[in-house]
Image (cartoon, rainbow, N blue to C red):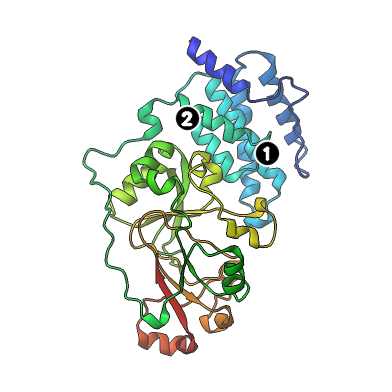
Amino acid sequence: MAGALGLWAEARALLPGSEEELSLALSGEVDECVPPLLLRARALLYEAAPPCEAALRRLGDVLRDYAWEKLNAGPWRDVSKAWRQVYAYGCLFGALAEVAARRPLAPAVRLCDMGLLMGASVQDNVLARLVRLLQAHLPRADRRGAAPSSAKRARTESPPAPVVRPEDTVPHERCPSLEHFRDRYLIPQKPVVLEGIIDHWPCMKKWSVDYVRQVAGCRTVPVELGSRYTDEEWSQKLMTVNDFINQYIVNENSVGYLAQHQLFDQIPELKEDISIPDYCCLGEGEEDDITINAWFGPAGTISPLHQDPQQNFLAQVFGRKYIRLCSPQDSENLYPHESQLLHNTSQIKLKLSLVLTVEKFHLFLNISTYDLTI
């Protein structure tokens, strides 16, 4: 009992000291029934220690359900930040109710992750601070996760890499100066492989499948199911990192891909193992505008030919990735999809037979490509 009350005190300490200090200001308008629910939940947090967990849980459920309808009413880009904040508050109140009820902490951790994934930051990113606290109090087996007794070890040897013709290769540079990189590659918009840039990152020695289990095994992440996102059978699913590793990394019965996810914002412990390269300072905007994504998957995952809106640095920590690059001047020859959703993605599948490519996408045969394996 003392330990549970101690955890509640630690969780409660993440919030402001008084009810008035816990501002519930939102970034926009929401339905008039929502602010009273937020105010009632806030009052519960300051009325008793611990609060009435049943009432707090109900309010969290209502806020999440109400906001969820708004989050899924149209394209994500059109979702109001205010509704994402409401969803985050619903997750916060739900997680705190689990702590107050002295229940197992895994559901509270999942609620925090759902708020981080689907919500917007509230109260100085309190969900990130709360989940870090809860994760530290999880039993070791729950925190790390465990592979099934019948599971194989994750495969560490990669299949043979595709053969890259010398004329298609990308130049390699070892730790070039900022000026050299800017003048030779950034301004002319030419690709380059930078060697020796990340050798000092802690992740280069620390990261492995087992380490990711240890740090993030209990955390919930979005996983893409299927070889490529343009396939009809492609879908997404939320699961814990441990379940993802067991199902798709250790037992490669099907293809699952943790792709282009802001994992380092969700799990800062992993972000501590990497750095932002100095070359990024040459780009437009401030350092806070830099987006850091993670990709983690088995052999056989494929990203279709596509164009990203920003300049990219791709750092390969372990494993291997084969990449084909095309010039932006050849965009129309790559037959982008006509739909708004996939307008930055080519209709061409690189594994199509040459005959089919000639028949349907004959302009593709006129372009030059750069191929590389990192």
10 Å crowding of disc 2: few (<14), some (14-19), many (20+): many
The number of numbered badges drawn on the structure is: 2
| Image location of residue 267, percent across then percent down | 51, 41
Q: Which residue is mark 2?
A: 135
Compared to residue 363, the image places residue 203 above or below, namely: above
10 Å crowding of disc 1: few (<14), some (14-19), many (20+): many
Front residue of this view, candidates 285 and 360: 285
| Image location of residue 260, percent across then percent down | 50, 56
Numbered circle sitting on residue 86: 1
Mark closer to the observer (2, 1): 2
Q: Is disc 2 placed on a helix, strand or loop?
A: helix
Q: Is residue 276 visible?
A: yes
In which quadrant will I find the C terminus?
A: bottom left
Residue at the image position 59 percent from the left and 65 percent from the top:
311
Q: As drawn, is 49 to the left or to the right of 212?
A: right
Numbered circle sitting on residue 325: none
Amino acid of disc 1: Val
Compared to residue 248, the image places residue 39 above or below, namely: above
